[in-house]
Amino acid sequence: MDVVNKKTRHAISSMIEKSVVNVIGAKEALLSHTHSYLNDFLLEDKLDNGIYALKNLDRKPVIGFFGHFDAGKSTLINTIIDEKLLPAKYQPATCVVNLLMHEDDRPNLINGQVALFSKGFMPHMIHDESMVKTYLIEQGDTSVLDRLGIHNYDEDLSSDAYVAVVFSTAEILERAWLLDTPGNLNDEDSGDSEKALGGVELADGIVFLSKTTGFMSDVELYFGAQIIRQRPPLDKLKPLEHILFVQSHCHSEIPYDEVLKVGDIAFKRCKKQFDDLVFESWKNDGKLITCPGQNELSNRTLPFWRENEKYRNELVDEVDRMVDYLTSNHVEIVKDNIERINKSLNVMLGQVIHELENKKDSVENRVNDILAQEQEFRKESDILKKEFSELISSCRAREVHDLATLRNFYDSKTSVESLTKLIESSFDNQKTAQNEIGNYIGQLLTTEIENTLKGSGKAFSFDLDSLLVRWQKSTPNICKESDCISSVGNLELDISGFDSRAAFIGGLSGISSLGAMSLYVSTIASNLGAYILVGKAAGVLTSLGLASSVTSVTSFVAAIGGPITIGIAIAAAIGYMFYRLAGGSWQKGLAKKVCEAFEKDSVWEKVENPVKDFWVSTEHATKSGLSELISETECFIESLKEDASKEYNVNELSNCIKTLSKVKSFF
């Protein structure tokens, strides 16, 4: 299997290298015939962007390890790499997201074994010198982790450290990167929950650890559901191939037969919760056909105890198989992106050739044509600006609609009658129900918030894209309309030299919370691939972690500006206050206590706030994108008019076209 994985990894690197060499050859062909007519197109820069986009594809799959503190995440990773590299203590230790990379992945800019980065750093950025400089906080040996990468409860040290990249020579890191996440999930002040949930953005595969005693109970079950929900399957027919559950602390005193029963019992108990909190969301997103059964979940569960050779070897082998699965999928993703990059460059060069052909026309004809197009654009753009304003104004109505939808759900799920039925159908005994009901209700509400905002955000994005397409078609250009249409990915694009989508996205630069615009940008990025990387939009995609992402679209954790920890907050509001219940049905008594806690702590406000923030962010981001779109369009039109006034030598234009045809042949 190691040989297969190495061959696969080599195949990926070879594909990328071959494509880079191809673009370099095209660049050399371009430079063999320099001419002032070609300078304005910045073709050398665009080919360099293509090379950069290709090199950024050489990013390995990431397997993230999640779970509560003392679940054994760091210990398991140290076991897998056969090296005591990460701090492992019997208290909440890790306070940053640790990303383990192979020594060969270390760029020249980093000379230490450990490099600490601030929030926003994404794995593929390790090869980007400017991104490394932007996010790097400190580098050094492993003592940096002991000082700034773990919780220090005796000293009041503040640090902006969010991701620690740790380099090792472990063989598995030649094929995949491993991610260790914080586990102090009950302490809202530590920031561990946010960092652990944020770590989902970096992961392609998930290993979730829970101690054998009490496996997948209480907070672990519901935190695990929130983690897994954010990473839908790569293949809807193999929904759990990228997920692995680990029963940690399976010490030798526990009989093997009892160990085997743990997963079966746990997933029989919590199958309904996984359906409600994970699988139904995947089905709504079209990522799943049928919900996995109890046996499928328990079959993805393995025991672990470092001193038990059988457990150790079986788990390491299963992680290795997950690497193989993720890598094989990565091949197809890389191949698809390489095709898009080549298509993008080919389309771009074809557009330049069309422009040069049109320059052979007389100045008078070209000027008159642009002026006529501009006149039509002014009429259409006034209409479109009004419709953009109406779309932006609709954010308030969409917020009201979402809040009404959620209020109905909230009221239906938090009545005494509904809670009683939920408790009766989900829990076999009073103690388990008392311990878990807060987390269950919290995650039910979290899931509904995500699904509601995702649905309304996609509808908003669709309306926005329709306006951008109309803006694109109305913008003046010097190509005949039939020559300017091409398709890259799943989108039909106008390649007239102006890209309304890229101009709009360029206006989102520097905005920390994008609301529905994160959904829009991630969708565009996954469809356009490298085409949109030309221009200002490239920096936006990079800052969002979307450029050359293995997953191609961000999870909804990022789409709302950060992890939703509403479930944890609601669980804390309900608390563990149900020590005594009145006589009669304990289920109904518990339901009444939950209702009292909801009213006492104003839980509805915890549901309201992320919805309000989402639509405020959407409104602000859309305004910024529209402003940039208008500004970029005006600049483009002025450049068209200026160019139309120039006299061109037809023979020299023909020579330039001949050169570009040669360059284009590389793609």
Image: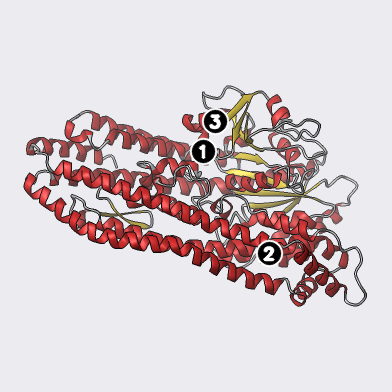
Q: CA distance from mark 1 to mark 3?
A: 10 Å
Q: Position of residue 307 (x, y in %)?
A: 82, 39
Is 56 on the left-hand or right-hand side of 254?
left
Is 618 on the left-hand or right-hand side of 470?
right
Identify residue type, mark 1: His
- Callout 3: 10 Å neighbours few (<14), some, many (20+)? some
In primary-sequence order, the first of circles 1 and 2 is: 1
Is 364 on the left-hand or right-hand side of 377?
left
Is 540 on the left-hand or right-hand side of 400?
left
Q: Position of residue 233 (x, y in %)?
A: 58, 57
Disc number placed over residue 105 in the picture, else none? 3
Depth check, front residue: 631 or 545: 631
In primary-sequence order, the first of circles 1 and 3 is: 3
Q: Nearer the viewer, mark 1 or mark 3?
A: 1
Residue on which disc 1 sits: 124
Residue on which disc 2 sits: 604
Q: CA distance from mark 2 to mark 3?
A: 47 Å
Asked whether disc 1 touches disc 3, contact meaning CB atoms under 8 Å apart, the reply is no
SS of the residue at dot 3? helix
Which residue does the image show at 50% across and 67% down from the upper left?
Answer: 397
Q: Nearer the viewer, mark 2 or mark 3?
A: 2
Depth check, front residue: 596 or 529: 596
Which residue does the image show at 75% across and 65% down from the upper left?
Answer: 598
Identify residue type, mark 3: Asp
Q: Position of residue 279 (x, y in %)?
A: 63, 64
In primary-sequence order, the first of circles 2 and 3 is: 3
SS of the residue at dot 2? helix
Identify residue type, mark 2: Trp
Looking at the figure, which quarter contains the N terminus? top right
Which residue does the image show at 13% across and 53% down from the upper left?
Answer: 369
- Callout 2: 10 Å neighbours few (<14), some, many (20+)? some
Depth check, front residue: 136 or 635: 635
